[in-house]
Amino acid sequence: MADPLFLGVDGGGTGCRARLETADGKVLGQGRSGPASMRFGFAAAFYSIITAAQQAVRESGLGEAAYPRIHAGIGLAGTGTRGARRALDNWEHPFASACFEGDGYMALLGAFAGGDGGIVVCGTGSIGITWRGQTLRVGGYGFPVSDEGSGADIGLNALRTALRTLDGRVSPTPFTEEVLAKFSHDPVEIVDWMDRASSTDYATLAPMVVHHAAAGDAGATALMKQAASQIADLAAALVKKGAPKVALVGGLADVMRAWLPDHIQPDIVAPAGDAMAGGIILAKRKLAGG
């Protein structure tokens, strides 16, 4: 019988990544596709998973015959939405086996190589996660009511700040001018966009804030400090719940760590691995009966 292969999948609100490895950790191929949050619909999530997996298999050069050897650990945003678990359990996937968890839990497994710790996800959304016999969550209830300090939240606050400049309540800066230019300085265009926008759409505004804050723009700096304070609050809550150390993960993690207040810095460590590594850890545990 051919040796098993392991696929780690990180499916988030912005995109989906997959990595195919041998049992001893040799990377065979990687893939990337669109958003894989269950909040965007089950069919769309499954399509993104398969697309990323196909790219990884294609890069490996193993061909279609590899699928019956692949054990997949798949992390997805939105697994707590109504009907998500049933849809995952009933999905006729092409792999030898597949196990599913939230993308945050997969990131936790990867960040501490399956060991003890806590993570704060700093991406399109945000959430704090640790493990004490069960998953303990802080925040992460979904944008816009939660996900403080996330890319979507930063984008929302960028729009709020920009609109205030149109009212004369806030002095314009290069940052607010760039945001407003995206919408032709027309509040009606902003409101029309808002009626259709998803959390992913709001998160596309976050890089403007990051760029201008790095250049010293007062308005953008204020937003980054606010976001970093909220991420620090999530990390501090995890420490109170018993996490010995906390890692920041996600697309904004490296940027956000530089903005964290001094009091939380001693509790922060670099992640050992990513969410795809976590998926592979989970897939190996499941195959071994763990």
Image: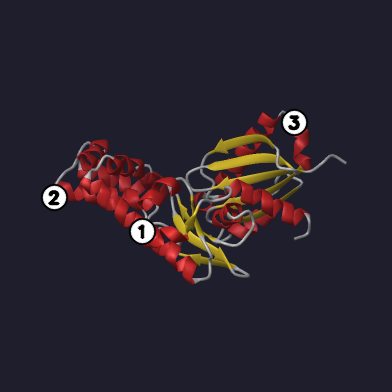
- The dot on residue 62 is 3
Say what amino acid the circle numbered 2 marks.
Asp
Q: State the quadrant of the N terminus.
A: top right
Q: How far apart are marks 3 and 2 (CA)?
A: 59 Å
Residue carrying label 2:
167
Q: Nearer the viewer, mark 3 or mark 2?
A: 3
Q: State the quadrant of the C terminus.
A: bottom right
Say what amino acid the circle numbered 3 marks.
Leu
Label 1 SS: helix
Residue 282 horizontal/vertical position (percent): 68, 54
User: Going 53% across and 56% down the picture, which residue do you hit?
Assistant: 78
- The dot on residue 262 is 1
Q: What is the quadrant of residue 105 in the picture? A: bottom right
Mark 3 crowd level (few <14, some 14–19, many ≥20, 10 Å Cα):
few
Residue 218 horizontal/vertical position (percent): 21, 47
Determine whether, in the image, residue 146 is placed left or right of residue 17.
Answer: left
